């Protein structure tokens, strides 16, 4: 199962997220759930660099199956806004996958 954890700060902003495990929906190379979740997560990370104009702190497993992303402290209000739009879009996209594949992906919040 893929486990996703979103961490919010005191203001309710997503400060970090982690994604670990494997969906095991199908064999490697044919796993629709894993491919979808991975594409959404890596798309969001790429968007943080490209559109958010930030360098998130990233920890990634060497053999896949683990990704953790932390947002550094951001002074600029517009940058914070852009980053939150990206992260909330990630959350919504993963929740959409979870709604259809509950036995393969679980999202929790801290």
Image: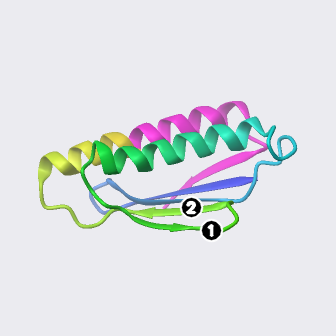
Q: Is residue 30 above or below residue 14?
A: above
Q: Which residue is mark 1?
A: 61
**Residue 91 located left or right of residue 55:** right
Is label 1 in a helix, a strand or a loop? loop
Residue 98 among magenta residues: yes
Residue at image location 70% in from the left, 46% down from the top: 105
Q: Is residue 10 above or below residue 98?
A: below
Mark number displayed over residue 91: none
Residue 93 among magenta residues: yes
- The image position of residue 34, as x and y in percent, is 71, 44
Q: How is the image coloured?
A: rainbow
Residue at image location 68% in from the left, 40% down from the top: 35
Residue lying farthest right? 27
Residue span colored magenta: 88-110
Residue at image location 23% in from the left, 67% down from the top: 73
Is label 2 in a helix, a strand or a loop? strand
- The image position of residue 48, as x and y in percent, is 34, 49
Q: Which residue is mark 2?
A: 67
Mark 2 vs 1: CB contact within 8 A: yes
- The image position of residue 70, as x and y in percent, is 40, 64
**Residue 96 located left or right of residue 2:** left
Q: Nearer the viewer, residue 102 or 24?
A: 24
Residue at image location 20% in from the left, 61% down from the top: 74
Q: Quadrant of residue 37?
A: top right
Q: Is residue 73 above or below residue 14?
A: below
Q: Nearer the viewer, residue 12 or 90?
A: 90
Q: Nearer the viewer, residue 75 or 14?
A: 75
Q: Quadrant of residue 82?
A: top left
- The image position of residue 63, as x and y in percent, is 70, 65
* For marks 2 and 1 on the same chain, the one whose residue lies earlier in the sequence: 1
- State the CA–CA distance, disc 2 to disc 1: 6 Å
């Amino acid at each position: 199962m893929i486990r996703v954890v979103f961490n919010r700060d005191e203001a309710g902003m997503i400060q970090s997220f982690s994604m670990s495990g494997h969906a095991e929906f199908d064999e490697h190379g044919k796993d629709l759930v894993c491919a979808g979740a991975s594409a959404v997560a890596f798309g969001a990370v790429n968007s943080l660099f490209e559109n958010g104009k930030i360098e998130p702190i990233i920890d990634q497993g060497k053999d896949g199956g683990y990704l953790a992303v932390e947002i550094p402290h951001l002074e600029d209000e517009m940058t914070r806004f852009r980053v939150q739009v990206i992260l909330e879009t990630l959350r919504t996209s993963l929740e959409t996958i979870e709604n259809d594949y509950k036995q393969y992906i679980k999202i929790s919040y801290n």
